[in-house]
Amino acid sequence: MNKNDMGKIFRPADILVPANCDMSKWSVIACDQFSSQPGYWDDLDRYVGDAPSTLRLMLPEAYLKQRDPFAEAKTINATMRRYLDGGVFRTLPQSYVYLERTQPDGKVRRGIMVALDLEAYDYAAGSASPIRATEGTVEERLPPRVRVRRDAPLEMPHIMVLMDDKRNGVLGSLDAKKSALPPVYDFDLNCGGGHLRGWQIGGSDAAALEREMDAYTQEIRERYEGTAPAMFAIGDGNHSLAAAKNCWEEIKKAGLPPERLEGHPARFSLVELVNIHDDAIGFEPIHKVLFGTDAEAFIDAARAFWAERSRSSGAGHTLRLVAGRREERVAVNGLTIGQLIGAAEEFSQGYIAAHGGQVDYIHNDDTALEMAGRSGGAATLLPRMEKDELFPSIIRSGPFPKKSFSIGHAEDKRYYLECRRIQES
């Protein structure tokens, strides 16, 4: 994809939204949240009941060990077809959606729903594509997602894509004109997720947005002249987008003629595009929490591990080591934030290999501390990454280690709402 095609990395789409649904029951948080708290999902299931809901179009990761993913995929795809045939949706033809998410803390995060061309995206560690992964892809997490998407008539994204738009030209242009745009939704999200409003962008407004996108990509090329810059980075939903890419590559191998591949709906993935410099965007660390392990030896082993890796010079970071009621803080010098996160994963995996147990990745400080205080629990709480480090780091050294950071707290995560057909009619 050459630079003259950059404006087409994102395109409008025939976006499906509910026609006459209870939006607070329709829209639910992403499947990879609260993965160690099935109670959250049990309560949500009772709240939704028999109402049409995106809860019925996905499998929460909290249930992966309790349910058969093959059987769940068939049920999910059947429900998608039933919703399509039953008039649950209305179509916003060839549109973008500008949205504002009021988070529980009162901050407003702005975004745009766009169709991302998967030809412009590559999650490989050495990628030089315009759109890149921010974190390493865990291959074993892909099959359940691929299995659902492969035969699914619909997609519904929780993917968030970051742009490094320091002048705020793209989203700022929409904020100024939203009062003149057709409203799409305006409602409270369930389970303390805040409030969501959306407006349709089409026609001349869509063309103006695309001109702003072209200006942004030109600015990035100039900023990182002499390199193959990352124009955009996956802020959330790395594995869901990787699954979409895998499904698209499968279709390409099927021998379809070029004209069908050019506009095939599975070539694109619906995502929310946000600006890393938005005041509501904040990176939260993802902590390493161990369950069912020897918590008594954890802190001493961790202190020895980090003493070997800390250097005498260079920037420092502070880690919190927690096991039961015991907590210590350890200073680690001379490592980048990416190296620090990678070393924390190395220690966690090595510790459970020697002492038993399992590791989970927890976003919220209080939740991690509560889990680490349980019998057989321990945790390494990591520091927050500064968001200005993200794009230069990706360009210089590729994706961060897996499960490195989160955009906001768990309750701030993107909720499923908009859908799009991904099968040929």
Image: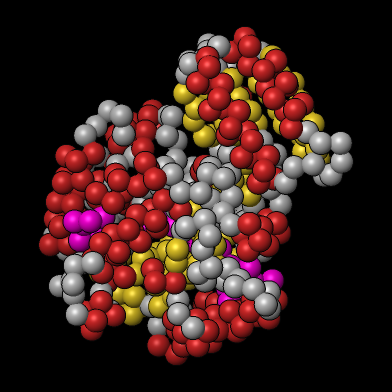
Q: Residue furthest bottom?
A: 204
Say whether residue 165 is magenta: yes
Q: Is residue 278 visible?
A: no
Q: Which quadrant holds the N terminus?
A: bottom left
Image coordinates for residue 173, horizontal then vertical, percent: 59, 80
| Residue 120 position within the rendered picture, expressed as x and y whole percent measured from the top left | 44, 72
What residue lies at 44% left-to-right and 40% top-to-bottom?
Answer: 33
When the figure is inspected, residue 294 is found, relative to residue 44, above or below; the finding is: above
Q: Residue 315 occupies which quadrant of the picture?
A: top right
Region in magenta: 149-172
Residue 179, x across and y down, in percent: 52, 77
Q: Residue at x 38, y 29 (%)?
A: 38
Among the 4 quarters of the image, the one containing residue 373: top right
* 1 to 132, vertically: above or below: below
Looking at the image, what colour scheme do you see? secondary structure
Q: Nearer the viewer, residue 86 or 335?
A: 335
Whole-percent x, y for residue 272 in the image:
46, 64
Residue 32 visible in the snapshot: yes
Asked if residue 364 lies in the magenta stretch, the reply is: no
Tell me the quarter of the image containing the C terminus. bottom left
* Left or right for 299, reference 24: right
Residue drawn at point x = 66 percent, y = 13 percent: 325
Q: Nearer the viewer, residue 237 or 297?
A: 297
| On screen, residue 414 above or below 396 | above
